[in-house]
Amino acid sequence: MEIYRSPQSKKQAEKPRAIYYSRGKLIAGVVIWVVATLGFGALTVRALPVSNIWIAVALITLASAWMLFNCIRALGKLDSPVLLIGRDGIRFPDGVLIAWGDMEENVYLDQSYMGLPVIKMVQIKTTLAKPRVKKMRVSALAMDSDEYMALCDSYSQGGGAPAAR
């Protein structure tokens, strides 16, 4: 049984849904990675005269500085959508559009170790020659896995966006 929708509501539901970065998650990431970079940087400086362990600690410092850079760069892109989910498929920031019919598998990976989040990623396996697999980290998006999967189910079946809760 179909639920009645006004023509305006139907038109709104057919528009693609833009998914943006979460300002709060990015600011928290900046704070965490500033503290981590400063801490590992201090360990690197203290390990310099002791032994060659400073090389490993310096590599960890560089990795945390890279994560800090990524958080700051994403803060500059708060006004542009990260994902566009619509009737035609999912469009990524690099312009790649994967149509619903070309998807073999659409998974939202949310892995944690002992309660600490390790990675949140969208992974789409396609029937296309290129890309065979499209992956994107989504830990700072303003949506969770349930909302992502509900949007994908709704649009892939032609129903448009589900009602907001």
Image (cartoon, rainbow, N blue to C red):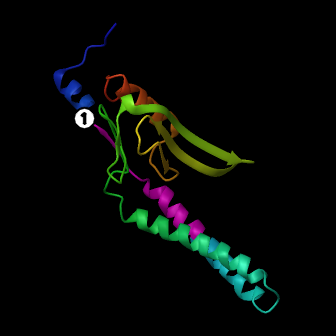
Of all residues, the one furthest to the right in this rendering is: 50
Q: Position of residue 115 (x, y in %)?
A: 71, 47
In percent of the image, x 55 and y 67: which residue is there? 67
Query: Quarter holding the C terminus?
Result: top left
The answer to whether 7 is drawn above or below residue 123 in the figure is above
Q: Position of residue 104 (x, y in %)?
A: 47, 31
Query: Quarter holding the N terminus?
Result: top left
In percent of the image, x 51 and y 42: which residue is there? 123
Is residue 165 in view from this perspective? no
Task: Tell me: 118 left or right of 9.
Answer: right
User: Looking at the picture, which amino acid does disc 1 mark?
Assistant: Lys
Residue 26 in magenta stretch: yes
Query: Which residue does the numbered mark 1 point to in the structure image?
Result: 15
Mark 1, Cα crowd under 10 Å, few <14 / some 14-19 / many 20+, is some
In percent of the image, x 20 and y 20: which residue is there? 6
Of all residues, the one furthest to the top in this rendering is: 1
* Magenta-drawn segment: 16-33
